[in-house]
Structures are given as structure tokens and as C-alpha cells.
Image (tube, helix red, strand yellow):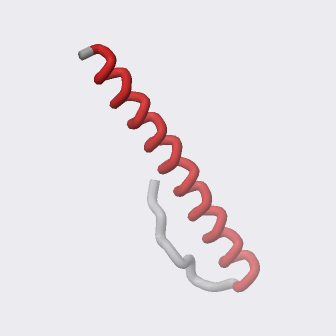
Amino acid sequence: MALLIKKSSEDFFLFAQFRHHFLLCLRLWNFLNIFLLQSQPFFDVGV
């Protein structure tokens, strides 16, 4: 049982890390779009 909980918490941590990096990339993409093209952001990502 403890092993199962440990496994699921590790999976959740990996997912959280992935989500964090994904949002960071989206924000960077938005910034580049606005900065280079002077356009509207492609995705409106709120925190």
C-alpha cells in the first residue's frame, strides 16, 4: 500500500514538473510573438 502511494506521488510530481515546463514554454512563445511580431498572444495563459 505504501509503495502504491509512493508511486502515485512520484507520477504526480512528474506531471506537475511537465505542466510547469509546458506553461513556461507557452509564456515564452507568447513573449516572442508579442516582441517579434507585435501581435496578440497565441494563447492567453493566466496563472
Q: Which of 18 and 47 is in front in this view?
A: 18
User: In the rendered image, which quarter is residue 29 located in?
Assistant: bottom right
User: How many numbered dots are placed on residues in this image?
Assistant: 0
Q: Quadrant of the N terminus?
A: top left
Q: In this view, does 36 lie above or below 46?
A: below
Q: Residue at x 30, y 22 (%)?
A: 5
Q: Position of residue 39 (x, y in %)?
A: 63, 85
User: In the rendered image, which quarter is residue 11 located in?
Assistant: top left
Q: Position of residue 17 (x, y in %)?
A: 52, 42
Q: Residue at x 54, y 78 (%)?
A: 42
User: In the rendered image, which quarter is residue 24 located in?
Assistant: bottom right
Q: In this view, does 11 lie above or below 26?
A: above
Q: Position of residue 45 (x, y in %)?
A: 47, 64
Q: Residue at x 57, y 64 (%)?
A: 26
Q: Position of residue 40 (x, y in %)?
A: 57, 82
- Return the residue found at the far right: 36
